[in-house]
Amino acid sequence: MQKYSVNNQSVGILLSWVKGGEIAIPEIQRPFVWTSRKVRDLMDSLYKGYPVGYIITWKNPDVRSKDGTISSGRKVIIDGQQRITALTAAVAGLSVIDKNYKESRIKISFNPLTEEFATRTPAIAKDREWIEDISTILAEDSNLFSSINAYFEKNPEVDREQVQQAFTRLLEIKSKPVGVIELEGDLDIETVTEIFIRINSKGVVLSQADFAMSKIASYGEFGTRLRKLIDYFCHLAEDPKFYKDLTANDKDFASSSYLPKIAWLKNENDSLYDPSYSDLTRVAFMKEFRRGKISDLVSLLSGRNFETRTFEKEIADESFVKLERGILSFVNEYDFKQFVMIVRSTGFISPKMITSKNALNFAYTLYLILREQQLPMNDIQSIVRRWFVASLLTSRYTSSPESSMDADIRAIARRGAQAVLGSIEESQLSDAFWNLGIVQALENTSVRSPILNTFWAAQAKANDKGFLSTDILISSMLEQRGDIHHIFPRDYLKKFGFAQSLTNQIANYTYAETWVNIRIKNKPPQQYFGEILSQVEGGEVLHGGITDRSQLLENLSQNCIPESVFTMNAENYEEFLAERRVMMAHKLKNYYQSL
């Protein structure tokens, strides 16, 4: 059974849909990014009768109200937003929101003598042969006869018949056809996504969050503001200076009750957790609905009754109220800052250390749920810290993350977070995990490894010092981009034929100050550690500033470097790796149990 229709609609009809609210343009999620040249080319193509591609819309399902009446759903733009926005700008003369979230006008000029279009410039504006802004001709209330006469007064010498024909063809732009593919409202996200991918030649992929944002935007003025709340929060989190543009360019939102909820971000420069609209929507949904699949959110916002498989206005209204509650929980200044502080207390102090954004998202969801349940803050902090770190250590939300989050949030709703966490620790963080699993996972070369980054976090939390440093902490190096040093220098190992997969083993990495790294160069450990042993016994200080043997041993202990390294060379390298992996795993276990 066909689930779509294909029709040609005139430019004028499309604009009437926008004006009448029949079609929802998600202008906040995707600001207008076309250049004025592309808008000009679109006008030129329409003028010449060239095809301009398809618009794809997804009809919101018809919903049934309590009184039994049926409300027809609005159309949501799935593909073609930029073209429709270009038409509203050039033809209807409306302002657009540009990529910097500023309101601006795009004026397209037209020369009736040469029949060419151009972006309006000061020079064109002064040239009497040009119509400065075609929207003055194409606007609904414009008078073509008056416009033509005004042009003739400025240009009395022109061929009047030629100019009249050009004006007529210009006006016909509003009747030119645009292909519209309308998808039925009862299609699921997976089907809509598949259709989009097959039609869209650019290979652009829409996420389920894109669909959710489009559904939000289609819910009238409330939906538009809610969507702005999501997008503005995320933009402010990355760029606090945007606050000035926001208040200057969006007076409607600035006067709403939402702006004070996020105004605190204008003075916030912490980048540890800068959520995207997808992150924010997911957390708000999981927190309020205790579900993890965004496709369910799209269905609920459409009013879907999962039992009867019908669409009901009451369910849609209730879902929007719940989603708003979840979003306001997310953007709350105290809770957001408290959560970031909890994450920092685990030693994860830099965003580059966090290899899974979903681990952050779920941890924040968990925090908000526990706060709502009014657990003591000490308990909340411990549960959230352990869940977050366990998620990273086990790559819990890396493979099929949405299914994993859905299962976890439902389990928490049934059994409680503490019980679910206990089951995870018992089954996945057993002694076998710490003694064997972690040790094996350290046989890796990636500096992006979640195990390695958790090791750095353990060092940061313990206030460990950098390799051979007397004062500089690992935490400072993580924040200021310190050097990752090879304990067995890479070039030294290459001379003995070691492959890169061995020279760059995680267990060969440690953080060191740049000058320490430079002084060691390509020396074998036996040599440069011999020089270090000499300096702690009163000899020349060559490596780091440590001049006391007990201080040296403490530094090695903090960095999980075995003392046997003093006498090691290339033939002992793999022995060193095995020994250090065990020490690193032991440190990770103690770190986790301290959370």
Image (cartoon, rainbow, N blue to C red):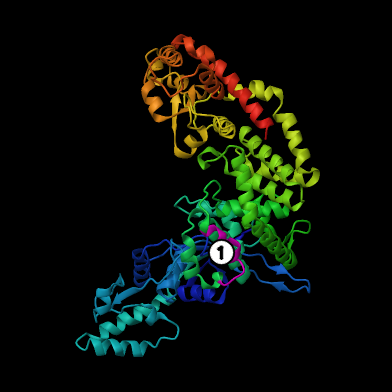
- Identify the secondary structure beneath mark 1: helix
> Is residue 58 in view from this perspective?
no
Q: Which residue lies furthest to the right in this view?
A: 415
> Is residue 476 in view from this perspective?
yes
Residue 422: % across, % down: 76, 35
Residue 413: % across, % down: 77, 47
Of residue 34 and residue 175, the one placed in the foreground of this image is: 34
Mark 1: few/some/many CA within 10 Å (<14, 14-19, 20+): many
The correct choice, above or below, for 494 with respect to 513 in the image is above
Q: Which residue is drawn at 52% across and 35% down?
A: 475
Q: Residue furthest left?
A: 157
Of residue 563 and residue 18, the one placed in the foreground of this image is: 563
Asked if residue 558 lies in the magenta stretch, the reply is no
Tell me the quadrant of the picture where the C terminus can be found. Answer: top right
The correct choice, above or below, for 548 with respect to 78 in the image is above
Majority secondary structure of magenta residues: helix
Asked whether, in this view, residue 299 is left or right of residue 448, the answer is right
Q: Which residue is drawn at 70% across and 68% down?
A: 63
Total numbered labels placed on residues in the image: 1
Asked if residue 256 lies in the magenta stretch, the reply is yes
Q: Which amino acid does label 1 sit on?
A: Lys
Residue 508: % across, % down: 49, 22
User: Bounds of the magenta span?
Assistant: 255-266
Q: Name the residue under label 1.
A: 228
